[in-house]
Image: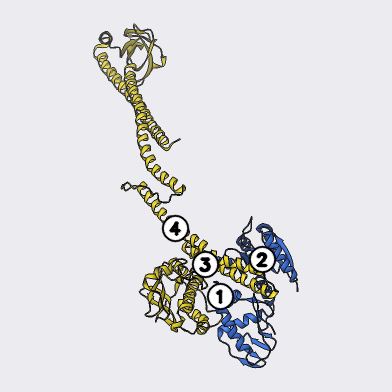
Amino acid sequence: MSTKLRIALLAGFLAFASNLLIIGFIHFQTRDEIVSALRRQVTEQSAVLGQVYRSGGLPALTKEVSEAAAEGDPQVAIAILDRDGKPMAGNVAAVDSPSALSLGGARSAVLRMKDETSSLEATVSVSPLSGGKWLLTGRTVSAGISLRETLERSLLVALAVSVILGLLCGLIIGQYVDRRVHDIVRVADRISGGDMSGRVPLSGANDSFEELSRQINHMLDRISTLMGELRMLTDSLAHDLRSPVGRLRAAADAALAADTPEERDQMLGAIIRQSDSLMRILTTALEIARSEAFTSQNQFSWFDPAQLCDELVEMYEPVAEEAGASIRLDRGPIVVPVFGHRQLLAQALSNLIENAIKYGSSGGEIAVLVHDEDSTLKLGVTDRGPGIPEERRDEARRRFGRLDPSRTAEGAGLGLSLVQAIAHLHKGELALFDNAPGLVALVQIPVRTDRKEAPGRPPLGLAL
Amino acid sequence: MGRKILIIEDDAETAAYLARGLSQEGHSVEQAANGQDGLFQATDGSFDLIILDRMVPVLDGLSVLKALRAAKIETPVLILSALGSVGDRIEGLECGSDDYLVKPFSFAELLARANALLRRSEARVTSDPRLAVGDLEIDLLSRTVKRGGRKIDLKPREYLLLEYFARNEGRVVTRTMLLEQVWDYHFDPATNVIDVHVSRLRRKLEDGFERPLLHTVRGAGYMLEA
């Protein structure tokens, strides 16, 4: 069943139910009112006739009753009854309910009028006269009832009309909802069909549909970006894996064709090295994707970034020395603890340090920098090597963006893009500056100030 | 001496490869092809080491691990996984595993790690504050090192490196193990940073002595042996 139809039916049903409720209320309310009006009239008439009886006695009353009966108002029932309830005067032929002949206020009774064949419901009042006779005054209910029936008929018509109107309103609302939802469905269809360019049209109204559409569009933008990056990643992966896989295959071929066991061992060693390097490329590419999906944020903890930098300087000092460079820690006056992923930040810094050693050690001086300025933590590495020209810095941060066009050196150019992804994970940025000469690579992370616990981990085993 | 090892791995080829290799090393090996059977066997038998694949059917590896640790079964667990990012490794270690090895791995790396874990569970019993490898003596309390009675000055990190080698005396220790255990980092460095540290340590240990102590094992790593 379509949404439109369901909404229309629901609206129709609601109109029906609410009108039914109102009609029921009117039905019972009017019945009560009619009956109590009749009772009032009956009681009044009874009082008037009582007055006549008291001043003029039975003859005056009989005359009055006969005159009233002679007026011929079909609503008025009036009679003087004998001891047994038989009418002596008036327009009543018989009283069918004997219980009516007792004292008390107005009540219901069933009467047969003179010149009538069927009995009628009436509201009557009975008062005693001398000699066991009774005075009966009453009003037949039929007139009031017919009024009520007219009312009820028109209410039923109103009910039918309201159901139709309800259905119509429902159809209009349904049409509106259906159209708005359909806009969204159409876009979703296009997306499922592989066309990511579709967006939900915005109407400019400030309603929930607009909000929903905006959210969906926002989500689609984000997905498109991620998919674009993913596509670039897979394209570049496919491209960049081709050459190591080719080398791997060549080494395997060479191992097969090897003449001596020594030669074969050497080739097998090369195969293992090639596959390790392939694994490293894949792991790094995955690592970047993971960092960007923010899945590692649950592994965040408080730690001292200066201590981390110190450890890394100590770790890379011998490597830098072998490459003919020196490495030192450049630490700001105050460095606050940072809430982050210690392992990933260590990896980011070590990537920067290894880059500096690989490309910048000709300049001699490498510094690992940790500064805390304007609630931004700056972690990074400076070198005095050739640096990266300004127009190529964006390219350097891109995945597989290797500035070495020959692509002979080890690595797949994922280093800086991993650092960038890790910076993003910490809501920060990787910035590259000119060190005149050389390169400054800085991971800039906003510092959280809501620290509650002590820094995460003690130094490894001993004070370093 | 042979020890009892449980392999929980659904890939029959890998499981058979591991079982064959570990049996050749003199260990007795049992296998489980899914997490539930593995958990059952692990709670039942008294194994010295469990090698656990992270992605096994019925009950995944991390759930098996958590269930084991919740049941206070402290058998060393080595996780094998194709999920190799830093975050994955740390997640595995935080769930209570003792080591984490990324697929594909070389058997030498696996054996080295398995032996280190078996060794560690043994070493818990002894409380000797000294380690000796040939004429090399390490005092764990004062953190001093002597060889042939002569004191050797080591930097703090070099000392940690040596202590780790000595605790795994006669066993192959891989570069990744050193990076994880001595430096507590879980990434693959692109440079030969570990080798440089090891060769510095080697120079300090061996300069002026005839017998080499710290050996390079081709295709695997290093080994400290008198």
| B79 is higher (above) or lower (below) than A63 | below
The amino acid at mark 3 is Thr
Chain A drawing hue: yellow
Question: Which residue does the numbered mark 3 point to in the structure image?
Answer: A284
- In the picture of the structure, the residue carrying the numbered disc 1 is B184
- Left or right position of A184 against A89: right
Q: Residue at x 50, y 79 (%)?
A: A312
Disc 3 crowd rating (10 Å Cα; few below 14, some 14-19, many 20+) is many
Cα–Cα gap, marks 3 and 2: 25 Å
Q: Give me the chain letter of mark 3.
A: A
Q: List x then y, in percent, for residue A179.
A: 37, 40
Marked residue nearer the N-terminal end (1 or 2): 2
Q: Which residue is mark 2?
A: B51
Query: In terms of secondary structure, where does tag 2 sit?
Result: strand
- For label 4, the residue is A228
Mark closer to the observer (1, 4): 4
> What amino acid type should be assigned to the residue bearing mark 4?
Gly
User: What chain is tagged by disc 4?
Assistant: A
Which one is closest to the eye, mark 1 or mark 3?
A: 3
Rounded to the nearest angstrom, the CA distance separating label 1 from label 2 is 22 Å
Nearest to viewer (mark 2 / mark 4): 4
